[in-house]
Image (cartoon, rainbow, N blue to C red):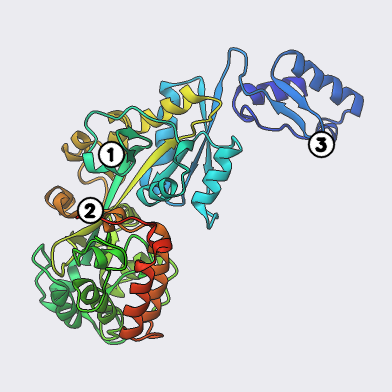
C-alpha cells in the first residue's frame, strides 16, 4: 500500500492538496486491518508526502519535498476546443517538468464567474479563463483585487490588452480574440445565383438575399442565437450611440438611431420567410443547423468556427452587415492568476506560457482561433490545409478598426442585463414600441441603474 500510494503521489495521480482514499477504503482495497492501514499512512507522513487532517482525511502536502508543484486551472466550456488545451498543457509540462497543471473544466456551471470567485476565495483555483465581459463584471463589483497583476507581452494586440487592463495594470493575459462575423454556405449562394457577401453589405442586403436563399420547407436564409451577449449587442453598437449621459435624466430613446437598430433586430427575427422559428438554447444549436444546411448565413465568431475545422463543409466568412457604421462585437478570452495563489510563481509561469509565442503558435496551427499575439496571428500558417479554415481567414486584419467590446456602450452591467430583459419583451411582442421607449428611458435615467456615471461636457 505504501509503495502504491507513494508512486501515485510522485507521478501526479494524486496532486498536492488532493485527499487520499479514506482508511476504510484503503483497508478494503489492500486487504489490510485498520491498524496496518493507519501505520502505512503514518509512514507517508514521515516521508513528508501527506498530512493528516482531523475529521477530513489524509491530504497530499502542498509542497512535495524535492518533487512537484501543482496548480489548478479552471476554464469555461469551450476552452478545450478553442485553445487546443490538452496539447498546451502537455507542452507546458515538457518545459516545466516540476509543475503539474490540474485542469478543472467548469462546463456544467451555469454561473461560471460566480463559481470562479468562490473557488479563488477558497484557494481551489490558481489560474482561470475569463473574457472581457467577466472582467467588466469584476471591475464594477470591486472584485478586481482578487487578480494578480501581470507583465504584458510586448507584441500583444493593444485592443486585446485593453480588455483586461485597469489603469496601467494588466490583470489577465489575453490569449485569443474573436470578432463577430457572418459565416455563409458558398454552395447555397452558387445554387441561388446570389453574389457572396462583402464589407459593403447592409442589413437590408441580408434581408433581400436571405429571401432568395431560403427554400420553403428545407432551409432559411439567416439565423443567429439572439440571447447571446456576444450577438445582440452588435445592433446597439451599430447605432453609434453612447449611453453615458451628459446630465442626469437626459437619455431619450424616441427618434434615435438606437431605436432604429432595435427595430431592425425585431424586423430580422420576426421575418419567418428568412429567419426560422427555432428555439435555440445556445450558439451550438445555430452551428448545428448551419452544418445541416438548414440555414444559409449565421452570425458567429472565429472561436465558434472551430466546430467546422475537421468537417467537409464549404463555407466562408464576411464582415458583419452594418446599419449606420461598420462595427462588430469583439470577445477577448484571457487567463487570470489568483492573487492569493499558494503557488504564485508556478501560476504566473503557466499564464505567461499561454501568452507566449510558442503556445500561441500551437494554438494557431491547431485551431481556427485568433492568437492575441500579433506576430503569430499574422504570420504564414505552417500547414494552411490541415484544418477547414475559411478562405477569408485573414479578414480580421482588415476589420480591426470596426472592433468594439460591450464596455464601449459605456453602460454598466447592472443596466446592461435589465436592458436585455426589456428588449426581449419588445422583440417577442409582449410590449409595444411606446412601452419599450418608456421602460428603457426609465431604466437608463435612474441614478441607481446608471451607477451615477455621466459623460463630461
Asked whether, in this view, residue 18 is left or right of residue 118, the answer is: right
Q: Along the polypeptide, which appears first: circle 2 or circle 3?
A: 3
* Secondary element at tag 2: loop
Q: Nearer the viewer, residue 249 or 170?
A: 249
Residue ID for mark 2: 456
On the image, the x and y values in percent for residue 283 come to: 38, 64
The mark found on residue 161 in the picture is 1
Q: Along the polypeptide, which appears first: circle 2 or circle 1?
A: 1
Which of labels 1 and 3 is toward the front?
1
The answer to whether residue 275 is seen in the rendering is yes
On the image, the x and y values in percent for residue 319 come to: 16, 60
Residue ID for mark 3: 25
Quadrant holding the C terminus: bottom left
* Secondary element at tag 3: helix
Pointer 2 with pointer 3, Cβ within 8 A:
no
The mark found on residue 406 in the picture is none
* Secondary element at tag 1: helix
Q: Nearer the viewer, residue 130 or 390?
A: 130
Residue drawn at (20%, 53%) of the image:
403
On the image, the x and y values in percent for residue 169 come to: 33, 33
Asked whether, in this view, residue 25 is left or right of residue 117, the answer is: right
Against 63, residue 164 (above or below) is below
Pointer 2 with pointer 1, Cβ within 8 A:
no
Residue drawn at (16%, 38%) of the image:
380
Asked whether, in this view, residue 56 is left or right of residue 167, the answer is: right
Against 242, residue 70 (above or below) is above
Q: Along the polypeptide, which appears first: circle 1 or circle 3?
A: 3
The local crowd at label 3, few if under 14, some if 14 to 19, many if 20 or more residues have their Cα within 10 Å, is: few
Residue drawn at (48%, 20%) of the image:
97
On the image, the x and y values in percent for residue 339 come to: 49, 31
Quadrant holding the N terminus: top right
Separation of marks 2 and 1 at Cα, in angstroms: 25 Å
Amino acid at each position: 500500500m505504501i509503495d502504491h500510494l507513494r508512486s501515485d503521489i510522485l507521478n501526479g495521480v494524486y496532486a498536492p492538496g488532493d485527499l487520499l482514499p479514506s482508511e476504510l477504503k484503503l483497508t478494503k482495497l489492500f486487504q489490510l486491518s485498520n491498524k496496518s492501514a493507519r501505520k502505512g499512512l503514518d509512514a507517508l507522513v514521515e516521508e513528508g508526502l501527506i498530512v493528516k487532517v482531523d475529521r477530513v482525511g489524509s491530504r497530499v502536502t502542498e509542497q512535495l519535498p524535492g518533487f512537484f508543484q501543482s496548480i489548478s486551472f479552471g476554464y469555461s466550456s469551450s476552452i478545450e476546443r478553442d485553445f487546443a488545451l490538452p496539447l498546451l498543457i502537455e507542452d507546458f509540462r515538457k518545459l516545466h517538468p516540476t509543475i503539474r497543471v490540474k485542469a478543472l473544466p467548469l462546463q456544467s456551471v451555469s454561473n461560471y464567474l460566480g463559481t470562479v470567485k468562490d473557488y479563488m476565495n477558497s484557494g481551489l483555483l490558481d489560474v482561470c479563463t475569463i473574457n472581457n465581459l467577466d472582467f467588466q463584471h469584476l471591475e464594477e463589483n470591486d472584485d478586481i483585487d482578487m487578480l494578480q497583476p501581470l507583465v504584458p507581452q510586448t507584441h500583444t494586440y493593444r485592443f486585446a490588452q485593453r480588455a483586461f487592463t485597469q489603469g496601467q495594470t494588466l490583470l489577465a493575459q489575453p490569449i485569443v480574440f474573436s470578432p463577430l462575423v457572418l459565416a455563409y454556405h458558398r454552395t447555397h449562394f452558387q445554387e441561388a445565383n446570389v453574389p457572396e457577401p462583402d464589407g459593403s453589405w447592409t442589413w437590408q442586403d441580408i434581408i433581400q438575399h436571405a429571401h432568395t436563399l431560403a427554400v420553403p420547407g428545407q432551409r432559411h436564409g439567416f439565423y443567429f442565437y439572439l440571447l447571446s451577449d456576444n450577438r445582440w449587442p452588435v445592433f446597439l453598437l451599430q447605432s453609434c450611440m453612447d449611453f453615458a449621459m451628459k446630465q442626469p435624466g437626459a437619455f431619450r430613446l424616441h427618434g434615435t438611431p438606437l431605436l432604429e437598430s432595435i427595430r431592425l433586430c425585431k424586423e430580422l427575427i420576426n421575418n419567418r420567410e428568412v429567419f426560422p422559428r427555432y428555439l435555440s438554447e445556445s450558439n451550438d444549436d445555430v452551428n448545428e443547423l448551419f452544418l445541416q444546411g438548414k440555414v444559409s448565413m449565421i452570425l458567429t465568431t472565429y472561436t465558434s468556427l472551430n466546430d467546422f475545422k475537421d468537417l467537409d463543409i464549404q463555407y466562408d466568412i464576411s464582415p458583419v452587415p452594418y446599419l449606420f457604421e461598420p462595427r462588430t462585437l469583439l470577445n477577448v478570452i484571457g487567463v487570470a492568476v489568483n492573487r492569493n495563489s499558494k503557488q504564485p510563481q508556478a501560476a504566473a509561469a503557466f499564464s505567461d506560457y499561454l501568452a507566449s509565442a510558442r503556445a500561441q503558435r500551437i494554438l494557431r496551427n491547431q485551431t481556427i482561433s485568433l492568437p492575441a499575439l500579433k506576430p503569430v496571428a499574422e504570420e504564414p500558417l505552417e500547414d494552411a490545409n490541415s484544418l477547414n479554415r475559411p478562405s477569408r481567414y485573414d479578414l480580421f486584419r482588415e476589420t480591426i478598426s470596426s472592433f468594439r467590446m460591450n464596455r464601449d456602450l459605456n453602460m454598466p452591467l447592472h443596466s446592461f442585463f435589465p436592458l436585455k430583459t426589456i428588449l426581449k419583451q419588445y422583440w417577442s411582442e409582449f410590449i409595444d414600441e411606446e412601452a419599450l421607449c418608456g421602460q428603457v428611458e426609465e431604466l437608463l435615467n435612474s441614478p441607481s441603474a446608471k451607477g451615477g456615471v455621466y459623460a463630461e461636457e
